[in-house]
């Protein structure tokens, strides 16, 4: 299994948001803080256990991205489903 780190696109494997794509804003222990550019922004990230996440390949620098850029980047992963 890939190690989850900041800037990685991930897909939720469990919970009410199952199947939803996020970008990892940061990680702390067994938890990751996630953003999607719409409901979950950098000011209000979602805290989720890493075991409930499926990482995808690639890492992007999230520090310079605004909400629109995050949404646009994640749309490339929506199309793969």
Image: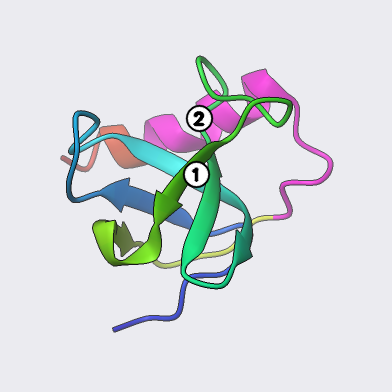
Q: Are marks 2 and 1 in contact (CB under 8 Å)?
A: no
Residue 9, compared with residue 3, is above or below; it is above
Q: Of label 2 and label 1, which has the lower sequence position?
A: 2
Disc 2 target residue: 36
Horizontal side, residue 79 vs residue 14: left or right: right
Where residue 75 appears, x then y in whole percent?
40, 30
Q: How many marks?
A: 2
* Figure quadrant of the C terminus: top left
The answer to whether residue 74 is left or right of residue 79 is: right
Q: In this orientation, which residue lies closer to the viewer: 76 or 3? A: 3
Q: Quadrant of the N terminus?
A: bottom left
User: Label 1: which residue?
Assistant: 47
Image quadrant where residue 66 sits: top right
Q: Residues within 10 Å of mark 1 (few under 14, many from 20)?
A: some
Tell me if 51 is positioned left or right of 59 in this view.
left
Front in this rendered view, residue 3 or 81: 3
Residue 41, image quadrant = top right
Nearer to the camera, 14 or 60: 14
Instruction: Name above or below for residue 69 compared with residue 53.
Output: above
Q: Which residues are magenta?
A: 61-76
Q: SS of the residue at dot 1?
A: strand
Q: Position of residue 63 (x, y in %)?
A: 81, 46
- Assign the magenta stretch its main secondary structure: helix
Give me the C-alpha separation between circle 2 and circle 1. Answer: 12 Å
> What residue is shown at x 24% (from left), y 31% (from top)?
17
Q: Which element carries disc 2, helix, strand or loop?
A: loop
Q: Is residue 41 above or below residue 45?
A: above
Is residue 70 found left or right of 58 in the rendered image? Answer: right
């Amino acid at each position: 299994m890939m190690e989850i780190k900041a800037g990685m696109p991930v897909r939720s494997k469990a919970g009410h948001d199952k199947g939803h794509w996020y970008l990892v804003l940061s990680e702390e222990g067994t938890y990751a803080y996630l953003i999607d550019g719409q409901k979950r922004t950098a000011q209000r990230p979602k805290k989720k256990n890493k075991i409930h996440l499926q990482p995808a390949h690639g890492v992007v620098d999230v520090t310079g991205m605004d909400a629109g850029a995050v949404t646009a980047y994640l749309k490339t992963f929506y199309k793969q489903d």
